[in-house]
Amino acid sequence: MIYSDEQVVVTHRLSPTDGMYVPGYLVIETRRHAAGLPSLVESEVAAVARAAWRMSCALERELHPQFVFSLIAGRSVAHVHQHVFVRPRGTPDTVAWTDVDSWSERPRVTAAELVSLCDRLRSHSP
């Protein structure tokens, strides 16, 4: 976990490929189960937005990506998840903005390096 408060939790995606992790893919979830944006109360919306902004700034400072993107999608899980993720510098234009994982030369880090990144991201939290 990178950050949590009474309304949201921020984590880094943990999906290793060959024992390596793709750095810079965060997920912001509400603590209360809500199937979609219309189900949130205003304070939860504000908490999600604040966390997304803070974490996008932290990713920018720590990873210096080409872009930081964000989206809310939850087709497989009926629970609000805001994704905040980087597009590394040098990613070819042929790679879709939502699919950096398909780029074979994407940056990867060890589990220890991912823990270190999460610690640095945590330092940007309130």
Image: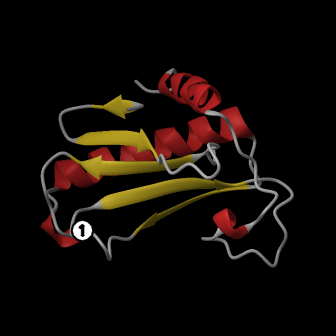
Where residue 12 appears, as percent x and y from the top left, is: 47, 42
Where residue 119 appears, as percent x and y from the top left, is: 52, 22
Amino acid type, mark 1: Leu
Q: Nearer the viewer, residue 95 or 56?
A: 95
State the residue position of label 1: 37
Q: Quadrant of the C terminus?
A: top left
- Write the residue at 21% across / 70% down: 78
Q: Residues within 10 Å of mark 1 (few under 14, many from 20)?
A: some
Q: Quadrant of the N terminus?
A: top left
Where residue 26 appears, as percent x and y from the top left, is: 48, 47
- Write the residue at 37% across / 40% down: 10
- Write the residue at 45% across / 58% down: 83
Where residue 109 appears, as percent x and y from the top left, is: 68, 38
Name which quarter of the figure residue 59 lies in: top right
Q: Nearer the viewer, residue 63 or 54?
A: 63
| Horizontal arrangement in the rendering, residue 59 relative to residue 15 (left or right) | right
Please tell me how many numbered marks the rendered image carries. 1
Q: Secondary structure at mark 1?
A: helix
- Write the residue at 25% across / 31% down: 5
Name which quarter of the figure residue 8 lies in: top left
Up-down: is 31 above or below 80? above
Name which quarter of the figure residue 100 lies in: bottom right
Q: Nearer the viewer, residue 86 or 14?
A: 14
The colour scheme used here is secondary structure
| Horizontal arrangement in the rendering, residue 33 relative to residue 75 (left or right) | left
